[in-house]
Amino acid sequence: MPHERAVPQAIREAALALLRAGHSLATTATTLGVSPDAVYDWRQRWRTDGTVAPRPPRGGRPPRIRGDLAAAVASYVDAHPEMTVAQVRDWLATTHDLAVSCSTMRRTMLRLGFRFH
């Protein structure tokens, strides 16, 4: 399943109850206002995993700037709050030999708790 929409647990469990009571996938889906595919997926998930709870989100690509390097960026920005994202990016390239885009630097700064006006 490529993407799970956040459907309340109660609806997922109600779908299983309706299916166990003999309702079809289509009737169950219509009754609960969800797609038949979702009901089918929940039933399959129940059969294989014993649960219809949403799966935890999968991790993505790890941030390029993390750990000690992220701490260095945070210290630098704390000491130089007037610096722009591009200037912090240039500092990183010069002092740590890591070239990143302004978008990557902005995401890093947001993740570190910095906000922009």
Image: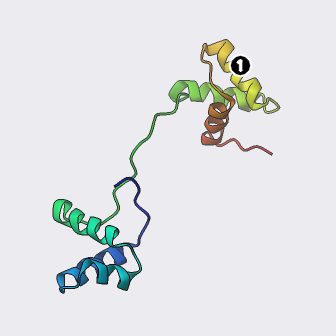
At a point 23% along the width and 81% down the height, the residue shown is: 24
Q: Residue at x 44, y 65 (%)?
A: 6
- Residue that protrudes farthest toward the front in the picture: 26
Quarter of the image where one finds residue 46: bottom left
Residue 89, above or below 31: above
> Which quarter of the figure is the N terminus placed in?
bottom left
Q: 110 above or below 89?
A: below
Tell me residue 25's x, y (percent): 26, 77
Q: Residue at x 62, y 32 (%)?
A: 104
Q: Residues within 10 Å of mark 1 (few under 14, many from 20)?
A: some
The foreground one among 2 and 75 is: 2
**Location of residue 39 by image quarter:** bottom left
Quickly name the residue at label 1: 91
Q: Position of residue 115 (x, y in %)?
A: 72, 44
Q: Is residue 74 left or right of residue 34?
A: right
Find residue 33 and report its horizontal and vertical position in percent: 41, 80
Query: Can you tell which quarter of the image residue 108 is in?
Result: top right
Label 1: which secondary element: helix
Q: How is the image coloured?
A: rainbow
Find residue 112 and report its horizontal and vertical position in percent: 61, 39
Q: Is residue 96 left or right of residue 45?
A: right
The residue sitting at 46% across, 34% down in the picture is: 62
Say above or below: 37 vs 96: below
Q: Amino acid at mark 1?
A: Trp
Number of marks: 1
